Image: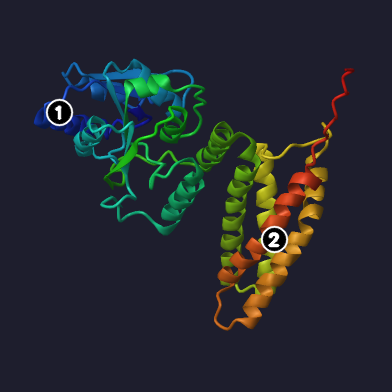
Amino acid sequence: MPAFEEAPNLPHLIGRLGDVARARGLTLDLWIMDDDSRDGSVEAVRAFPEDWVHIVVRTEDHGLSQAVLDGLRRATGDVLVCMDADLSHPPEAIPAMLEKLGEGADFVVGSRYTAGGSTAHEWGFLRWLNSRVATWLARPLTHLEDPMSGFFALRRRSFEAGRDFEPIGYKIGLELLVKCRSERVVEVPIHFADRRFGKSKLTLRQQLLYLLQLRRLYRYRFGAWTPLAQFLVIGVAGTLANLLLLSALLAWGVGVRASVALAIAGALACNFALGRRLRAVPVVAPGRSWPSLLASYAAASAPGALANYFATTQLVSRVPGLRPQLAALAGIAIGAAFNFTASRYIAFKATHVRAPRLPR
């Protein structure tokens, strides 16, 4: 159980875990991996007399994924379970997860989105949208409805069979799912509750790290297909930027044509910045400044952007009642194929050197 500044939640969670263990006759070995919170977590845990509860204060290599891997290596059981410490994951679902492992599953996920699963009513639209987009981006890696879940169970032999872990960000479950090569993966429905105490640790930086993690996992799983997968990830981010900016500009009273143009420009800037951040395309000319690269990217993307603008504005003017956002989606689709080709082979063209022919 990774934890950071979760002192108010830990007594409640330990109590519920104890109730489940006693009711189902389970033997638990709980490792709380605290990233040096200094918020009273140690004292709160040590107030429990149970010898199955342990807390480890991690003073270096902080991070949720690193904490989870550390905890899984310390745990002594044949079955490993990971869950959050903020009361969002119900301990009462653990017996059902263990049952699925007993039926032959390699990896079991406590799922918000499978049939019977649910989320707290406090979730706003943006939080729901963020979760859904992140889930869609992981779709090429797994068929799961909720691959983003941090509540999962697997057997020790599956964990020990995993290789090349690169813990980063907060979605370690997806990392384990891919790197442990789990084939029989099932979901158990859960109600994902909102935290009762403390504040969320999900930040913009964590979301950017998730995109970097996806890039690594795509590269690990697909090899030569990685550039296309990266393009799709960045394209989805640009699409969201386009739609959000377009909606905001229209709400502020900006004209449709101007809003469409500014939204396209903003999306291109987002794509360029994210591509540079993730190193999703090869960059030549070492030492070349980012303004120069941006100019090349803009030039290469201009025809696709113009096609996008033309298609969007024409649809808005010719189809009565069509929302500009829907027209923008069509325009984005029209420009996407060209933008991938241009950015890959013009703006960021890699220099290839033909190997010398060896004498026969």
Q: In the rendered view of the protein, which quadrant contains the C terminus?
A: top right
Q: Is residue 199 above or below residue 61?
A: below
Residue 149, percent from left and from top? 37, 40
Q: In the rendered view of the protein, which quadrant contains the N terminus?
A: top left
Looking at the image, which is closer to me, 253 or 141? 141
Residue 114 as seen in the image, left or right of residue 307:
left
As helix, strand or loop, the secondary structure at mark 2 comes to helix
In the image, which disc is placed on residue 310?
Answer: none
The residue carrying mark 1 is 21
Which label sits in the foreground, 2 or 1?
A: 2
Q: Residue at x 28, y 50 (%)?
A: 117
Q: Residue at x 83, y 44 (%)?
A: 292
Residue 114, percent from left and from top? 32, 50
The residue carrying mark 2 is 335
Looking at the rendered structure, the kind of residue marked 2 is Gly
Residue 101 as seen in the image, left or right of residue 249:
left
Residue 348, percent from left and from top? 78, 42
